[in-house]
């Protein structure tokens, strides 16, 4: 990764040397729950989740983030539009996770650390909670 480059930009330009794989049951369950409980537009991406595969890309930081390739669709262009974002953990382990799309294509699931390193494993849906409304107003302008 280049200095100042975002994880998502790095992911978009990183070559893939292996083949895509099916989502694990946990990955599919988590992404489905997030889409069902995310923004008003998030549920519209549920049909794409049924066609999603995980690309071989791995984040250089070692976190549990994954990129999707939707069967029958082109690769999503670089960039991200979060459609389902949540917090998990306590004050010492506070982290976030979001499902994102770009140009109408379900693109991936990103985890990130707020109080420390990004998580190395995906959270359970039961551990997720929405962002406080005050934080949404700050981040959404």
Image: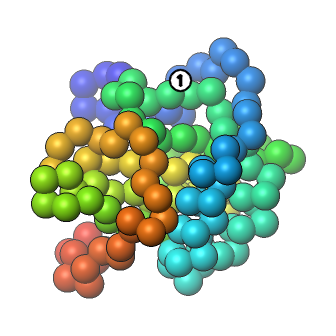
Q: In the visual, does 131 lie left or right of 18? A: left
- Which residue in the rendered view is the most extreme toward the top? 17
Instruction: Check the image and name the residue furthest to the right.
Output: 72
Q: Give the colour scheme shown.
A: rainbow
Q: State the residue at coordinates (53%, 78%).
A: 37
Could you say where residue 29 lies in the image, as x and y percent from the top left? 63, 60
Question: Does residue 131 lie above or below 9 as drawn?
Answer: below
Establish if 84 lies above or below 14.
Answer: below
Numbered-mark total: 1
Residue 81: horizontal and vertical position, in percent? Answer: 49, 60
Q: Quadrant of the C terminus?
A: bottom left
Horizontally, is 51 left or right of 37 in the view?
Answer: right
Q: Position of residue 129 (x, y in %)?
A: 35, 73
Within the image, what quadrant is residue 2 found in?
top left
Q: Nearer the viewer, residue 137 or 109?
A: 109
What's the residue at 25%, 32% (across, down)?
4
Horizontal side, residue 13 vs residue 111: left or right: right
Mark 1, other Cα within 10 Å: few <14 / some 14–19 / many ≥20: few
* Picture residue at 23% right of the left edge, 39% below the top: 117
62 shown above or below 40: above
Counting from the top left corner in percent of width and height, residue 57 is at 56, 28
The quarter of the rendered structure image containing the N terminus is top left
Asked if residue 98 shows in the view, the reply is: yes
Which of the pair 17/104 is nearer the observer? 17
Q: At 63% across and 65% down in the image, what residue appears?
A: 32
Regarding residue 69, the answer to whether it shows in the image is no
Q: SS at mark 1?
A: loop
Residue hosting label 1: 14
Location of residue 45 with respect to 107 vertically, above or below: below
State the image quarter where residue 138 is shown.
bottom left
């Amino acid at each position: 990764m280049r200095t100042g480059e975002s994880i998502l930009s790095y992911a978009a330009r990183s070559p893939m040397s292996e083949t895509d794989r099916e989502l694990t049951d946990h990955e599919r369950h988590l992404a489905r729950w997030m889409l069902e409980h995310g923004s008003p537009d998030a549920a519209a991406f549920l049909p794409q989740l049924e066609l999603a595969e995980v690309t071989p890309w791995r984040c250089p930081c070692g976190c549990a983030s994954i990129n999707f390739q939707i069967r029958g669709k082109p690769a999503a262009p670089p960039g991200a539009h979060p459609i389902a974002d949540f917090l998990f953990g306590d004050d010492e382990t506070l982290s976030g996770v979001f499902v994102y799309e770009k140009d109408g294509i379900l693109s991936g699931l990103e985890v990130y650390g707020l109080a420390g390193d990004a998580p190395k494993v995906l959270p359970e849906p039961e551990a997720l909670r929405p962002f406080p409304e005050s934080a949404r107003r700050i981040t959404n302008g």
